[in-house]
Image: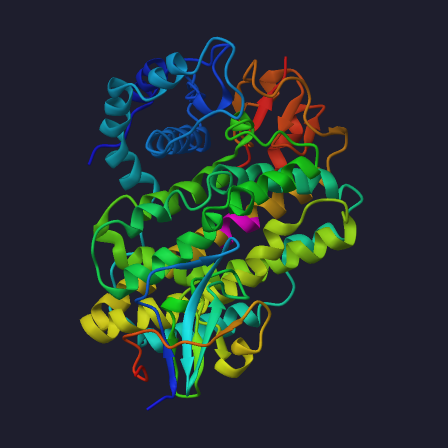
Amino acid sequence: MSEVWIGRDLPPIWRDGVEYFVVSRREELFLVPNRCPHRGGPLKFGYLNDSDELVCPMHGNAFPIETLLNGPGVRRLKEIPAGAPNAA
Amino acid sequence: MNAVTPNALAVLADRLGGLTAEAPAVYDSRIDVLRDEADPALDTFVKHQALMRCYQARYVLLPSVAPAGGLLGPMQRHYDPGRLQALDAVRPALEAELIAPPADKPPTATTARYIEAMLAGIRGAGENPFTAWLATSEHRDDHYRNFLVQSSPDLLAEASASALGVVGEFGEPQSALFRILIDEFGYGSYPKKHSILYRAAMRGFGLDDEYNAYWPLFDTEALRLHNVIHWLFQNPRNLFKQIGFLLYAEAAYQRSTQAHYRHLTRFNPTVDARYFGEHAHIDLHHSRMVIDEVVAPLVGKFGEAVGAEVVVGADLTRAAFTRAGDHLLAVSQAFEAAREATWGVEGDVRNPLGRPVTPTSDLTSLNGAKVQVGAIGVLHDARELARFPAATIGRVLA
């Protein structure tokens, strides 16, 4: 099972005019801009493939999770939301 | 089904009315009225005009600028139920006569093999014949204006036909088709809408970018291509043929727009070429999406019988694209060889609407009158039109 979880069913998270979605990876939580680098597609509605890449639902572009989490605008969180698989 | 007679077309033309001074171009509903002469090429031309009016009457058009006399009058006249009914009454007969799809035939290959061969054919087709020829012409900008004008019936309202193909409920392929449509409409961002990018290219060549601004200059093949596309999307019965259209169009258009993008960046670097660059990029995705997310699952679920329909739609589209492309090039080359001509559009393109003539019309009776050919230019002697391709339309200038 992948160690990555996408918060696609969580409500939209807005901060400073940017929409984010939650990504949980191992014991860490991130807010990732919900905007595909290709054409702005809603990344959080994509799916994780067998190579741990997030596949955009718009045009099928695949992004390694590691690359996404180290991309511009990503914010690291300190708390794990209730409902996530690795929540307490 | 009985063919639409010249008299019925004249009645329709009367019902649609003329273009009044205050009516915006988007509500231009004119079709030409044939005189007594029996010219099958003109008959076909006017029928295609009428069929295009049938389709245009079904999508929303607003002028770019508010008309001086107000919008609601011209708009409500344009979409008057009686006018729509008159158009609907002739549409089935026009479609039956003008857009005969290839006869149903058993598939000669599986859909997957057809797609493989189609893609190989498109990739191996070599240089785009039109842009390759343009590079050799001193009047390439005049020919390019004509290309933009003749393509504008469809591209200034791009994806208006295929939008009809995503309504309803037909499973996951519907969502893939909708995502393609989202791209066409610019993700809801007006400046990114493909038709808006096309407008920018037209303005770059000094052309009016209003929808229908060049109605009198559209020739038979430009109308035919528009009508084939719109015919496909009028009826859900054609769903798999519609998908065939997208299958061929997305793959072929990616290549042709790439050629046009290169042409513009080489010869017209100040012209906004984003329309062509955008398609050259995004149609790579669309082609894959149609193949993997639409055709493959539908054929997998419903069998090769629906795949055969997809193939029919793709072949119909290929024939329409090829015919329009060949015609455009042939007209350009014929005009280039004219003995006496002036380049560009002469006079007010909207009014008066000069009488249409074809290469098979009685040109000698015109006593050497000038003839406007598309947006390319004006022949100084109408008789020169006789050596143009059969589907060429000229407008006799006063």
Q: Is residue B104 above or below residue B20?
A: below
Residue B49, percent across and down?
41, 30
- Please report the residue visible at 66 percent of the width from the left and 49 percent of the height from the top: B273
Residue A59, percent across and down?
45, 66
Q: Quadrant of the C terminus of chain A?
A: bottom left
- Please report the residue visible at 27 percent of the width from the left and 62 percent of the height from the top: B309
The one of B131 and B373 positioned closer to us in this rendering: B131
The colour scheme used here is rainbow
Q: Is residue B284 above or below residue A25?
A: above
- Please report the residue visible at 37 percent of the width from the left and 77 percent of the height from the top: A80
Tell me which secondary structure the magenta stretch mostly adopts: helix
Q: Does the rendering let one see residue B312?
A: no
Please say whether residue B270 is one of the residues in the magenta stretch. Answer: no
The one of B181 and B17 positioned closer to us in this rendering: B181
Q: Quadrant of residue A81?
A: bottom left
Q: Is residue B120 above or below residue B25?
A: below
Residue B88, percent across and down?
25, 29
- Please report the residue visible at 62 percent of the width from the left and 47 percent of the height from the top: B329
Q: Which residues are magenta?
A: B322-326
Residue B84, percent across and down?
27, 24
Q: How many marks?
A: 0
